[in-house]
Image: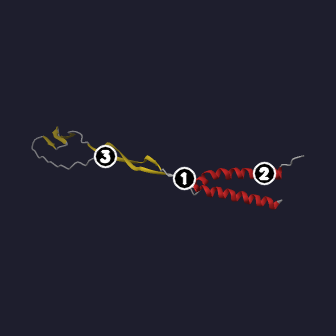
């Protein structure tokens, strides 16, 4: 009984291997023409400008004024100084003529590239060549071998596992 099962399983494995091997030998029937590959690259540039205020060292300007009068005025590009003597006291004023601000522009550029790859197949040509006898056997033989395998498995199951009462 055991030897029959092992032989049967071996026969089934051989049948399955033969079915798989018979389907693996079929050549391709279609030839493709006009196949095009194209690569498209899109680059997106984003420029961000940022305006900042920076502190700038002013150039040093020195002016001196000597006078015999009780009143004196000295000015530079950025300030005016006034000095006077009144009732035995020295009075001194200094004023800025305006504010100095320097605006700087910081430019930051971001680049982003996107690559698109397209493959276009525009035409498929059918080869006008009849199937050979071996190819016809491969095409139809699979179904015959599958039917035989199913019948063999059914016969094995019925013979060994199902008992008929007469």
What label does residue 155 carry, if any?
Answer: 2
**Sequence-first disc among 3 and 1:** 3
Residue plotted at (65% across, 50% down) = 143
Q: Residues within 10 Å of mark 1 (few under 14, many from 20)?
A: few
Most extreme residue toward the left, as rendered?
Answer: 68
- Residue 91 relative to residue 123: left or right: left
Estimate the x, y position of residue 84 in percent, counting from the top left: 16, 40
What label does residue 106 carry, if any?
Answer: 3
Identify residue for label 1.
131
Q: Residues within 10 Å of mark 3 (few under 14, many from 20)?
A: few
Residue plotted at (45% across, 50% down) = 32
Estimate the x, y position of residue 89 in percent, counting from the top left: 19, 40
Circles 2 and 1, Cβ within 8 Å, touching? The answer is no
Residue plotted at (31% across, 46% down) = 106
Up the image or down, 32 lies above or below 6; here it is: above
Q: Nearer the viewer, residue 49 or 95?
A: 49
Up the image or down, 14 lies above or below 140; here it is: below
Estimate the x, y position of residue 85 in percent, counting from the top left: 16, 40
Disc number lying in front (2 or 1): 1
**Sequence-first disc among 2 and 1:** 1
């Amino acid at each position: 009984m055991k030897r029959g099962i092992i032989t049967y399983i071996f026969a089934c494995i051989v049948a399955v291997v033969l079915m798989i091997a018979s389907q693996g030998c079929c050549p391709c029937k279609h030839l493709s023409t006009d196949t095009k590959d194209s690569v498209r690259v899109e680059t997106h540039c984003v420029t961000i400008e940022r305006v900042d205020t920076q502190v700038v060292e002013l150039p040093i300007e020195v002016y001196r004024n000597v006078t015999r009068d009780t009143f004196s005025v000295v000015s530079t590009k950025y300030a005016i100084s006034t000095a006077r003597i009144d009732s035995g006291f020295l009075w001194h004023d200094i004023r800025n003529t305006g504010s100095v601000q320097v605006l700087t522009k910081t430019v930051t550029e971001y680049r982003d590239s996107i690559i698109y790859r397209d493959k276009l197949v525009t035409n498929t040509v059918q080869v006008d060549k009849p199937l050979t006898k071996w190819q016809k056997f491969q095409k139809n033989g699979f179904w015959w071998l599958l039917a035989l395998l199913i019948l063999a498995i059914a016969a094995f199951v019925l013979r060994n596992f199902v008992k008929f009462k007469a």
